[in-house]
Amino acid sequence: MKGSTHRRCYCRDPHTGKPLGKKCPKLSSRKHGSYSIRQELPPREDCTRRSFSRAGYDSLKAAQADLDHIRALLGLADTDDPEGMALIAAMLEEVGDEKSPLPDVEETRRRLKSGQDLIGRLTVGEWLDLWLDGKRIRKSGLSRYETDIRFHLKPRIGHHRLDRLRVNHLSDMFTAIADANAEILEQNAQRRASVEELATVPWKGLDNRARRKVMKTAIDAMPPFRRVTGPATRLRIKATLRSALNDAIGQQILTFNPAAHVELDPVRKPKALVWTDARVARWEQTGEKPSSVMVWTPEQTGAFLDFLAEDRLYAMWHLIAFRGLRRGEACAQPWSETNLDDHSLTVSAQLVQDGWEVETSEPKTDSGFRVVALDDDTVNVLKRHREQQDADREEWGTAWVETGMVFTQEDGSWLHPGKVTDLFERLVAASGLPPIRLHDLRHGAATLMLAAGIDVKIVSDTLGHSDTRITRDIYQSVLPQVGKNAAEATAKLVPLQRKTEAEEAARKAAKKAKDKAKAEARAKKKSKRKKPRK
């Protein structure tokens, strides 16, 4: 297709004011005026002509370089590919209208072959929306991604072009999140101080009521209490963005993932601690938990189960405490997968909570599908529970909701996992025992099994872990007595010549007696020497 370069100036006739154009006498000098290019483009669908024009080049060499660049772009599409030619022509027409830089030839070639937008104006926010719409995962996972995108990623980096997203953009985003955290903490402290001050103002008296009204108005005008974006949430935001950008690389939209190169502070997972007597005493004095993950001793677990002996859902608490089922797994366990004759149950489903909505889902991983062995006592507990459920079914009659679940509400309907957690917390408070979370019963089950000497592989399979390291590193809390027994066993492996305390005391006593006898003998001998002769 035709293309050309030409030189022109913008000088005007001093008398008429009209452009001189080619009649300008200064055009004989190569330094006067500027160069322009014009390249014919494939016609539009309605057969109208179109072209690419650009002016303002300082030299013929620069103008010719851009003209060659345009021709190279036009040459990316084969002559028998009218669709490709039309796409490139439309791209060049838009670039010319907006006076934007010419796109890279190789990048355009890659985009053309992969069927992507040749202009490359897809923003991060637009890509995140497209990526989220294409995800086919469980609803709770989608909600997590959607929260990260809506609250953090789109407001802070959504305006950037996807192909121009850099590591420094993400570093700035996380710095802004940290700054926002500091502001939230300060605002929360101000609101808390105002609320505490309001509580000290008496209700009676006109002056007090007027003062309370002014203070309440000021509190209402303050930002509400908000949660900060903690280290774990920041890592999750990074993981969401990294996953989205990896998919963009897979679709050949990007060649580099900046989220993989952002440095964030590591997150230390809370260590599970056992409620020892000293920690219980400290909690009773201050009300503070030593860790967010706490585990009962065997005696405390037994006291809790004894306290719940008459509870309608005792069997569920018993099963979680001894076999370590997750909350959602216990709520979704059907009788059809519970074989009491064979002393086993099969975990094949779980109830997943998204907000307050609940849906049935398969276990999250392949290791979640598992067969859990049951001891005789647990089997007897479940048999009594089934008998009670049969009695409830007869009592409710036609109003009974047949779900086939082992653990249900009074009318047979599904148990809501959120309500189960609330009920557990109330029962723990009523028992007078130190507080733990419902999921901490699962930690306790792992600890009890490991303390009983069960092989870690069996414990891992019972809990549904994909790797035994998860069981050891996260769920194994060393009970005090187990730790002492391990220390004693280790110490006995090393032969030492030191005497025990009893042996050392006996040795000292024998030496003392021996020394005393020697002293008496010397004294007796000395007295004989001093005896006068007759």
Image (tube, rainbow, N blue to C red):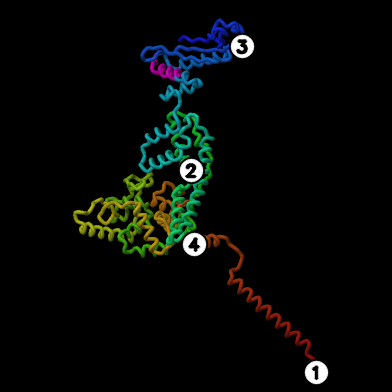
Q: Earlier in the sequence, mark 2 or mark 3?
A: 3
Q: Residue at x 29, y 53 (%)?
A: 338
Callout 2 crowding tier (Cα within 10 Å): few <14, some 14–19, many ≥20:
some
Q: Earlier in the sequence, mark 4 or mark 2?
A: 2
Residue matched to label 3: 31
Question: What type is the residue that disc 1 sits on?
Answer: Lys
Q: Tell me whether circle 1 and circle 4 mark residues in contact (CB < 8 Å).
A: no
- 453, 30: nearer the viewer: 30
Magenta region = 80-93
Q: CA distance from mark 3 to mark 4?
A: 85 Å
Q: Quadrant of the N terminus?
A: top left
The percent coordinates of residue 368 (x first, y second) are: 37, 47
Residue matched to label 1: 534
Q: CA distance from mark 3 to mark 1?
A: 149 Å
Element under disc 2: helix
Callout 4 crowding tier (Cα within 10 Å): few <14, some 14–19, many ≥20:
few
